[in-house]
Image (cartoon, helix red, strand yellow):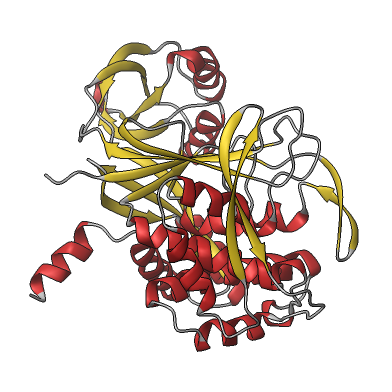
Amino acid sequence: MADVTIGWLDLSAGASGDMLLGALVDAGVPLAVLSAAVAALPVEPVVLSTEQVTRHGLGATRVHVHAPASDVHRTWADVRGILAAAALAPVVRDGALAVFERLAVAEGRVHRVPADEVHFHEVGALDALADVVGVVAGFASLALDRLTASPVALGSGSARGAHGVVPVPGPAVLELLTGLPVVAGPVPAETCTPTGAALLAAHVQEWTTLPAMRVRRVGSGAGGRDPEEHPNVVRLVLGDAVENAVEEPSAAGLLLETNVDDLDPRLWPGVLADLLAAGASDAWLTPILMKKGRPAHTLSVLCRPAVRSAVADVVVAATSTIGMRVQPVQKVALDRVQDSVPVLGGRVGVKVARSAGQVVNVSVEFDDVAALAGELRLPVKEVLRAATAAAHRAHPGASARLLDREGE
């Protein structure tokens, strides 16, 4: 099996467009690749240059974006027009459009206006256009099988933007990273920009600690500031995934079971919900026939040892049982990650399962689908169809490879 190339972003200092550009260049992406993509934009000339700097003694590459001063405020439609007219590779154009669409939707929600009416300020400027197109081109050139990242530090305090003083984390940043792991971080200032957040949301496929890999290259990209609390760098670690399709079974789980024949069946949905809220990994009912021919249910609850007491308390309090069986269980689990995809102007959660770094299962969160269908007043089946298609486009896996093979 060919090596699976993965990347991991260390975002403990946050992220911005220029920091990501620096990390890509430092990791081996030629500056010429990024410059060519930026030069393809039909706007005033924008030039990229690099500088070697240190942050808390760590060497890093800083990419400077030299753009003419301008007070032009572009709309989402303006940006779409610029990208449509640019002589870019389809993967770069589509990737940049996806990033700016996220920005437009997020800004629209923050300001309570339709996305097409959003007037970009900082993120519509020439340097932001260069950041987005350059980073998308850089990731495309790496052709990673999977991009992962640590939780992103957002900062704290307040900052001044085009609309005045805003709290940190900024509203647009929080909107862009909703559903994804974030932390404040050690620096009391804005450490993640909207452009950086949109790039991460569009490209990162899994949020995790450093995954198992054979490291090949590390790139460090520096931001303009040098705060005393933490090195202001994004690190990009590139390597080959350590092949291990499925983890060995582990006895980390417990199975609690009890047979119940005298509980009003209308109570069971609430019991299952309470168990999951108490920390159970899963809970389910199995119809059985008990002594004297009584119809009954076996309640089964899977949980971690750390939450055994809380889960057992719910079983005792919410059912009529007088005892339960407890046994350790082994579990074989695929690598999985939560993501979300844009669907009909909203977002729907997606669960992605991988084996040996390859996507094998993709499923959408039905509750998100149903909620979006209600908002749009559309049949649930239509939104489900659109969400499933969007999920498979974002995470092509075994089904896509099978279709490609059939078309050969």
User: Is there any visible trace of residue 96 in the rendered image?
Assistant: yes
Q: Which residue is depicted at the point 31% across and 32% down?
A: 213
Q: Is residue 309 found left or right of 391 in the rendered image?
A: right
Residue closer to the observer: 124 or 355: 124
Q: In the displayed structure, would residue 351 be above or below residue 311? A: below
Q: Which residue is depicted at the point 51% across and 17% down?
A: 307
Residue closer to the observer: 294 or 401: 401
Q: Which residue is depicted at the point 29% across and 35% down?
A: 287
Q: Which residue is depicted at the point 65% across and 82% down?
A: 44
In this view, the residue farthest toward the right is 164
Q: Is residue 170 found left or right of 78 in the rendered image?
A: right
How far across and how far down the image is residue 235, in percent?
A: 51, 39
How far across and how far down the image is residue 241, in percent?
A: 27, 37
Q: Quadrant of residue 99?
A: bottom right
Q: In the displayed structure, would residue 257 be above or below residue 220? A: above
Question: In what quadrant of the picture does the N terminus appear?
Answer: top left
